[in-house]
Each structure stands twice: as C-alpha cells, then as structure tokens.
Amino acid sequence: MTDASRAKRDPRIDFLRGVALLTIFIDHMPGNFLGTLTLRNFGFSDAAELFVLLSGFSAMIAYGRVFDQAGPGKGLRRVVARCLRIYAFQCGLLLTTLAIFQFWISYFGLEPHKIQMMLHGMQGFGHGLILHALPSNLNILPLYVILLAIFPLLWIGIRRAPVTTMLASAGLWMATNVYPDLNLTNWIDGGGWYFNPFAWQFLFAIGMLLARLYAAHDRSIASVAPLRLACAAYLGFALLAAAPWTNWGIDWRLLDLDPDKTTLAPLRLLNALAFFYVLMTAPWFDRLVRHPWLRLVEICGRHSLEVFSTGTLFSLIGRLVFRTAGMGLEIQLLVNGAGFASMIGLALLLDRPRRADAPRPVLLPGWR
C-alpha cells in the first residue's frame, strides 16, 4: 500500500464501521447485558443503518475512484470480484452455522429452531446458496451483495443525473413503506427479507452521494450550523422517545414509537443520517478517533468483512451457550470477551502488512 493510498483513508469512517461491527456482535445475542449500551438504545436506528450508510460511502470512495480513473471495465471487474468474495463468505458462514447447529442438536439437545429445516436434505441448503433462505443471523451479507451489485447503476446515475437518481431511489424506498409486501422472499418462514433491499438501497445510495460530495469538497462534509442544530435536536427527540427507560430503572416513556426496520421507516432513516452528519462535522470527533486506545476499533473497521464474519459466528455460539448454560454474569463476560478478542485479534493480524509497510502510531503503550 502506497503512502498516497494510505492517506486517502479517513479514520472516522473506519472507526464508525468498527463501532458498527462490534455493536452488531453484541446485538445479535438477545439478553446480552452489553446490549443496553448499544446504539439502538439511544435512538430509532441501530448499527445496521450505520453499517449500510458507511458501506455506500466507502464503496463510492473505493470503487467510484476506479470507475472514474480506470474506466467502467476495470471498475466492473472490481465490483464483481468483491461481490463474489462476499458471496463466498456468506456460503462459508452458512455451512459453518449449519454445522454448529447440528453439533448443538446432537450434543446438547437443542430445541426445535426454524433453521433446522435446512439441516435435512439438500433442498434447504440449496435455498441458502441462492440467497432464498436467510437464517436470522445471516441476513446482512446478502443485502450487501445486492447493494454492491447495483453500485454501477447508481454510480452512473449519481455521476450523470444525481437528482433524478436519488428521486428514483427515494421513490422505491417510499413504495416499500406504503406496500411492505414489495420484498424478496425468505424460504425459511415464507416471509420477506428482514432487510428489504428495495428499501435499504436508498440508504446505500445516500451514502454514495455523500461520498461524492465529500470527495468534491476536499474530503470534508460542510458544517452548516442550522442543519447541525436540527440534527442534534432530532437526535435528542429520538433519545427521549426510543430509549428503553424501564431497563434503566426509570418508569417513563415519552412516546410509544417502534419504526419498522425491514422497510427502513422514515424515523430510522432520519436518525441514521442525523447521527452521521453530527459526528462527521464535529471537530471533537475527528480528534477522538485518533486517540491511540481507539485505533483498535478503527483497525476492525478496515477489515470489515472478515471481522463481521468472525463476530457473526461468535454471536451465534454465544446465543447457543446462553440457551444451554444460562446467562449468568460470568458466562456473559466469557462470551463477550472471547468474541471481542477474536474480532480484534483477527483485525490486528490482517493489518500486519499495512503496519509493516510504514511506521505506524502507537496502538497501545509498548505496541508499535
């Protein structure tokens, strides 16, 4: 990696992506005591919205530059290669997930679960391979495959007719909110995809557009005081309305709102965008992410696919451990510690070539 390419990385983006990955790991284990501290407790949106928004932003920076500088041919090859890589990880996660469930059924007498219908014969597994059957813990990467597959079309549209493209994307998102049945089918339960790609493509497209504006304005997002104030006010309202106050010992609730996640309800969309804008225009956040102790989170964000996959498997094992061994504090500390150590350890291992290529700032005292 050259110095020029290294300089193009924004630590804020990698840090936020790392936060999203660690948060998804926590949230995928219902009852996890750390779940009271994650993003979903402080507003209408959670780590999923942040992850998809950052995916669009990062894809535009990475692949948009290839399309602009090397031409559509090379750009398409890069996008196809990435899609195939993500699909390969999805298949690997599916095989491993089924193996883990089979092990737990055989040795711990796991009670019936929806995914068990995929363990008998090849039909269920075949549906999984064509992304027609999505277990609950394996529904994010298929969404990303689709979003990345439509990236070339969105790139052309944003480059040549941004207003028309964004209006079309917004129209499709609005249609899913009016007609929720506009979705792909999940064979496991006969319902739709938990992350409706017809809705979530809008957040991905917004991320791409923001990245285009970011690149055109010297790698920055303009800080407009009235807009920042409006975003902060909305985040304050979302906190008051959505926070699980009863979980924190406070018998109070401002409003009974539960915006739909599958169709990316407007309240969730606005929350994610306001959160991103406030942080990306705050000088204190730029300073915060450069703190040596937080570099570990940034490194996780730089290797998102591998770290996400590791977190997915450890969260699955954690859920099964909770079901068989209980949810005592010691068990939860062990599961969370093992998951974090594996995710961060893998990220550090994958980042070794990058650190060896040039001197790096101190990650931890005594670590270079």
Image (cartoon, grey):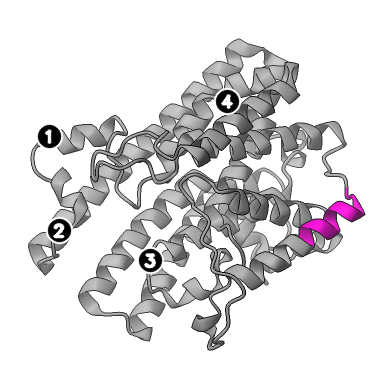
Q: Residues within 10 Å of mark 4 (few under 14, many from 20)?
A: many
Closest to the observer, 227 or 355: 227
Amino acid carrying label 3: it is: Met
Above or below residue 300? Residue 318 is: below
User: Which structural element holds mark 1?
Assistant: helix
Q: Residues within 10 Å of mark 1 (few under 14, many from 20)?
A: few
User: Which structural element holds mark 3?
Assistant: loop
Identify the residue position indicated by label 1 in the image: 122
Mark on residue 133?
none
Amino acid carrying label 2: it is: Phe
Identify the residue at the far right of this view: 225
The percent position of residue 176, horizontal first and vertical second, equals 49, 37
Q: Can you tell which quarter of the image residue 233 is in?
A: bottom right
Q: Which marked residue is nearer to the observer: mark 2 or mark 1? A: 1
The part of the chain drawn in magenta is 223-232
For the residues labelled 4 and 3, the Cα–Cα distance comes to 31 Å
Q: Can you tell which quarter of the image residue 235 is in?
A: bottom right
Above or below residue 58? Residue 366 is: below
For the residues labelled 4 and 1, the Cα–Cα distance comes to 32 Å
The percent position of residue 77, horizontal first and vertical second, equals 53, 17
The residue drawn where x is 46% and y is 37% is 179
- Position of the N terminus, as image quadrant, is top right
The percent position of residue 215, horizontal first and vertical second, equals 80, 33
Mark on residue 103?
2
Mark on residue 151?
4
Q: Are marks 2 and 1 in contact (CB under 8 Å)?
A: no
Q: Are marks 1 and 3 in contact (CB under 8 Å)?
A: no
Q: Are marks 4 and 1 in contact (CB under 8 Å)?
A: no
Image side of residue 2 versus residue 128, left or right: right
Residue 115 lies within the magenta run: no
Image side of residue 160 versus residue 154, left or right: right
Above or below residue 247? Residue 12 is: above
